[in-house]
Image (cartoon, rainbow, N blue to C red):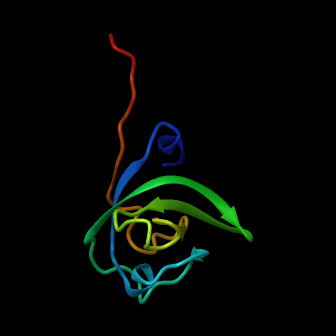
Amino acid sequence: MQTAVLTGPIACGIHVSKSLLNYTAGVMTDTDSGHTAIDHSIMLVGWGADAGTEYCLLQNNWGRRWGDQGFAKLQRGVNLLGEEEQCHFPQMRRPS
């Protein structure tokens, strides 16, 4: 997925938990009890590390008043909210 983000955002399904609804800053590393059902869509737009915790940067469509100006950092590699299960991204290829 990291390679795909280099060419543009990735659309992913995600479970909306209370933790996600109330997110304001930092890397989200825990949720209300894990995801149970994919019920929302977000865009993965980047990645990084914060204080040693790797995260993926997601952009939500709830506007700039939610989260950190409309973005959130979600711990990467542990599939907290199911964000690693249903993702779609373009595959670029040269025309024949």
Res 50 → quadrant? bottom right
14 and 63: which is toward the camera: 63
Q: For this rendering, which residue is in front, 7 or 37?
A: 7
Residue 48 as seen in the image, left or right of residue 17? right
Residue depicted at 45% across the width and 69% down the height: 79
Relative to 51, does residue 18 appear above or below in the rendering?
Answer: below
* Residue 44 screen position, x and y as percent: 45, 55
Residue lying furthest front: 65
Q: Residue furthest right?
A: 51
Residue lying at 39% horizontally and 28% vertically, measured from the top left: 92
Q: Where is 61 relative to 2, above or below?
A: below
Q: State the count of labels.
A: 0
The percent coordinates of residue 13 (x first, y second) are 31, 63
Residue at point 36%, 43% (across, down): 89
Please indicate whether residue 45 sits to the left or right of residue 14 in the image. right
| Image quarter of the C terminus | top left
Up the image or down, 57 lies above or below 74; here it is: above
Q: Nearer the viewer, residue 47 or 24?
A: 24
Where residue 52 appears, as percent x and y from the top left, is 73, 69
Q: Find residue 3 and report its horizontal and vertical position in percent.
A: 53, 41
The quadrant in which residue 35 appears is bottom left
Residue extending farthest to the top is: 96
